[in-house]
Amino acid sequence: MSGVRKNEEMSYWADRLGVSLSPDRHELEMLELNELKMVDLLPEMLLMIRSVMARQTFCFRREPIKIIEHGVSISFQNIIHSTSTPQAQPHVRIVPLHVATELTFPKAVNIQQVTILVNLDYLKSFIGKAHRTFDYLFDNDKTLWIEEFMSPEIAAIANELANSSDRAPLSDAFYRLKSLELLFHLFKNLSARTQVTHQQLTKYELESIYRVRDQLANYMDRPFLQEELVKISGMNVIKLRKLFTQVFGMGMYPYYQRLRMQEAGRLLKEELLSVSETGYRLGFSNLSYFGRLFESHFGSKPKKWMQLHKHVSSGSKKFRDTF
């Protein structure tokens, strides 16, 4: 599909979704749209698969999406690490459709997404009796924002969706089945989150929480300093802990260690660093402790894990080439 055709399709879906673009559609000109696939499973779901990169950093206000009443957007972002272009940490983000959202597109950062817009009644029916565990997501009066780590199972299914062809037999059935499979694994992971009483977040509170998250992500080789994070957030420590856990499903220190272990896996698999080089790069002076922490996260010691995964990165090349 040519760049003009891609922009025309993106413009069509922006109008259908009720997303306001400027009259001259300059937002589309700011984005290098490498891939766009829309799968209409309405009225229950709409599946979007896209790969974009901004020519310049810019912010965009996404107005409430009206194509699905009482729904959420579940975005599986950066489902494969790319060594050729910068990326954000792979993650899953859940945002209600009825609120406006500020979207930031950093310059030259590859954003790969599989996004499911899903009706809440349909989602509740799919989850079944277990939906009571997730009542905070089904309260449409609250503005909630949930982010979850990308599990290997979720990444594998999302990549299968991204690489599939809509010209295959029973393609709609395939997309629906795989979308539900993604939702199953996501909610299985969400059920293991630290339980907190969820409250509505203000824009300021959300921005504060992400400043703290970014500090953790940008300085994984530095010691964890709670006092510094409290100062960055502008909140008291009790409020910061509660809201951070609400958004990310775990406390700040466990989240910090989880980030470090995910980066350790990437360094071992993609940059082919040795175990000691990886540990030292992430600020571990005690390599025995690094090995124990890695094993508790991945289920095997770093050296064994590296041997098991040394051929995996070549298998992901097909996905990167399609975007």
Image (cartoon, rainbow, N blue to C red):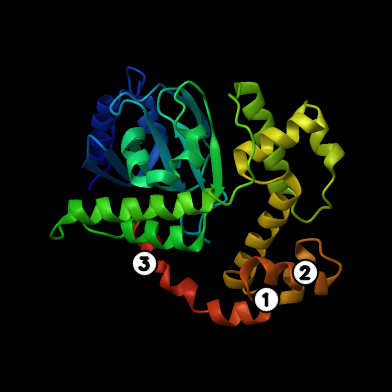
| Residue named by callout 2 | 290
Left or right: 264 with respect to 226?
left
The answer to which of marks 2 and 3 sits earlier in the sequence is: 2
Q: Please give the name of the residue rendered at 49% of the width and 79% of the height, measured from the top-left corner.
A: 311
The secondary element bearing badge 1 is classed as helix
> Does the CB distance between marks 2 and 1 fall below 8 Å?
yes
Q: What's under tag 3, amino acid-wise?
A: Lys
Residue 271: % across, % down: 61, 69
**Picture coordinates of residue 247, whole percent (x, y):** 60, 38
Q: Amino acid at mark 1?
A: Pro
Of the image marks 1 and 3, the number of the one nearer the N terminus: 1
226 and 266: which is toward the camera: 226
Residue 160: name its quadrant.
Answer: bottom left
Q: Quadrant of the C terminus?
A: bottom left
Query: Tag on residue 318?
Result: 3
Q: Which residue is mark 1?
A: 302
Residue drawn 72% across the image and 75% down it: 275
